[in-house]
Amino acid sequence: MQAGASGLGLLMISIVLYWSQSFDHRLERSLRQLRATLTLSTQLHARHESTALAFWEGYFANKDGPSPAFEQQARDLEESVDRFVAFPFPEEDLPVVDELHHLEERFRSLTKQLIAGARRAQEDKAQLSEVNRISGEIEVSLQRLEEAQIQHLESLGNERKFFATWMTILLIGFGGSAVAISIWSRRQHKNHLWRHLEQLRGMVAEVRRGNLNVCGEIPESLELGSLTRAFLQMALELRVMRDSLEAKVVERTAKLEQAQKELLQAAKLASLGELVSGVAHEINNPLTSILGFSEIILNRADMNPEILTPLRAVHDEALRLRHLVANLTAFSRRAPQRSQRIDLRRVLTRFAELRDYQLRANNIVLHLACPAEPVWVLADAEQLLQVVMNLVVNSEQAIKEFRERGDVWLACGSDGEYGWFSVMDNGPGMEPEVCEHVFDPFFTTKAVGKGTGLGLSVSHGILRQHGGNLTAESEPGKGTTIRATLSIAPAGPDEKPAETPVDSPIPVTAPPEKKQEASIGRHVLVIDDEPDILEMVTEALEPVGCRTTALQGSQGVDAALARENFDLVLCDLKMPGQNGFEVYRLIRKSHPQLADRFILMTGNLADADRYSADIDSITLLPKPFTLARLRGAVEEILQKRTPA
């Protein structure tokens, strides 16, 4: 009787499994078809909207001929329609599909006809209305098709409910049989069955309390033995998964903390950049006057020798202040301006050529380690040279405070995905709390007057602009290592390393004894809202044979251009009323031949970044500038762009 009951149970299980698998197969096939239909419908809807949008934009763009954007969208729409029509829809959905196909063909034909012809909104009013009507009908057809798919889904739901009902009936029947078998066999297996069940219950309770280190005796019976073994295996897998999950949580938490630190650092730099971007213009304007007038007086032959030394001090301190402001404004620049494929080895080698002697004179030995193969990165060589300079100067100052003689190690290399260079010293090192803030703006451990706290902050900002990163490792008494990473830029087979430009100081140059041939009799229009700068530029250009007309602000530009002929325009960017770019556009419209001889002065290059679309066609002269830079820019424009 027990064997018969077991056979009946197995038969019922087989029937349930077969029915379940058969239904799951049909349900999966129907859901795949439904999903594909909805995907095609959604894609067709999106392509139709994109094509309609491209049509209206192209039609009202006031350009004759077809719009490339519309043609591309029309081709994409046609491709989507073809895939949509080719899909094996149910028989009841085919009329809607055929109607939708006809509407889409009509829509594409009508829009292509309208956009290919001349734009006559009044004459095309009926056809444009037809386009709107067809678009509306397409929307309705797609909605009808989606409603049909929803009905199919509801049908599947009803079928599943029917299946669930029969499954419930079968399970109830199977449960009744199991109860009967249990009642019949309970007396036979009571002695050894309930003991193992109690053991299993205890293990389940332990797992529920969070204890996955459970163990127990595996019964010899097939049913309970398999169940206990499976439960113990499940507990083991859960334990492994829990341990793995805890490790992943720790790892992810560390990454999130690092990301939060980077976001805080970026926010600090961004807020500081916004601040100094506005202040830079106000500092650079008077600094331009100080630097320019000091050079003019220094270059006079009849200058009193008694004021030579203090005046040179004024000039040198102005250059020093210019460098400080340039570091500040580096925060507000959004991207490197002269990125090219360069070899990191050349940057380090060039730096070693510039600084090795001076470092040795200060009892510091510079060690350079570069690989045999080039390390190609996409970057601004001048800015990377500035980063290396800042890092080594920082190491040099730290070593001097710690020991009489020291070492600085420069190295670079590549790990296949990133290029890197590092600066390591045997200075005093830093405490962990100091190392955390080493890249913060104005953070410094040096005495008052010996550091601005900007060198590492500027370097960090430059690396972030290049898409790289700058990290610091340090221990007290064991020195500091700063490591920079940049994305690799693969080099061509015959490409040679780019030369590394060097930022050499701008000397004070005397005015030429002889007027340059290209400048004689030239008339320059100078526009600036600062009267001191107007006076300084006028005095600076007179020795090279340029006659100037100065305008304080942009209000009199139209009258000046109408009254006199000018060979060159020198204009400030940030002014009340019309700014420098607006003046340039005015000149380009009214005097196009003069727009090619236009120099834009600016006290903050971050302001010029907002007009990046026009920068390529304009010569920029950053403030503060020296007389040599001013005269050189004027001479270059007049010589290259003067008609023969």
Image (cartoon, rainbow, N blue to C red):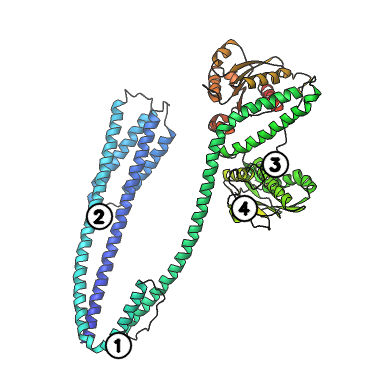
The answer to the question of whether label 1 and label 4 lie on touching residues, with beta carbons closer than 8 A, is: no
Q: Secondary structure at mark 4?
A: strand
Residue carrying label 4: 472
Residue carrying label 2: 153
The numbered disc on residue 500 is 3
Quarter-of-image position of residue 53: top left
Alpha carbon separation for disc pair 2 and 1: 50 Å
Count neighbours of disc 4 (C-alpha within 10 A) and say few if under 14, some if 14 to 19, many if 20 or more. some
Q: In the image, residue 60 lies at what x, y percent?
A: 38, 28
Query: Image height check: is 449 above or below 553?
Result: below
Residue kind at label 4, given as amino acid type? Ala
Comes first in the chain, label 1 or label 4:
1
Alpha carbon separation for disc pair 2 and 4: 59 Å
Q: Can residue 521 be seen from the camera position used here?
A: yes
Alpha carbon separation for disc pair 2 and 3: 67 Å
Comes first in the chain, label 2 or label 3:
2
